[in-house]
Amino acid sequence: MIRTGSEPRTARSPLRMRFWLSLWGILWTGFGTVAFAITGRPGWAIACGVLLLITLIDMVVIIRHIRQGPHFQPGRDVPPYQPPEG
């Protein structure tokens, strides 16, 4: 595969990887929220709860993009985008 040097401008998001990382984040922040709440550290429990909420919102956005189809998640058979001329 030939690199064009324009990859940052024409990069596509790896949604499946983001999905699994978000799932991992949901598990850890959920565990952290419960663990800190049980041990009596409300500040840390709130911080983990806020991170859990952010991760859940990210997961919803990722699932929405995946369900929108190949326009937002091209497969391996789609060649890289060509940089604009000029």
Image: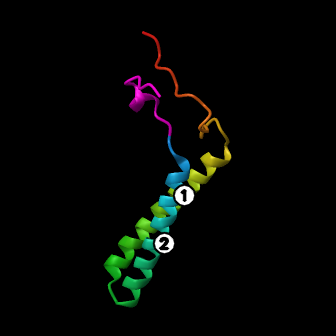
**Figure check: 30 above or below 1:** below
Q: Which residue is mark 1?
A: 59
SS of the residue under disc 2: helix
**Figure check: 10 above or below 59:** above
The residue at 37%/24% (across/down) is 5
Residue 31 falls in which quadrant of the image? bottom left
Q: Which residues are magenta?
A: 1-12
- Name the residue nearer the viewer: 43 or 32: 32
Residue 35 falls in which quadrant of the image? bottom left
Q: Which SS does the magenta portion mostly show?
A: loop
SS of the residue under disc 1: helix
Q: Are marks 1 and 2 in contact (CB under 8 Å)?
A: no
Q: Which residue is mark 2?
A: 27
Is 6 included in the stretch rendered in magenta?
A: yes
The residue at 42%/67% (across/down) is 50
Q: Residue furthest top?
A: 86
Q: Position of residue 81 (x, y in %)?
A: 52, 25
Residue type at tag 1: Met
Q: Position of residue 11 (x, y in %)?
A: 46, 34
Query: Which quadrant of the rendered structure holds the C terminus?
Result: top left
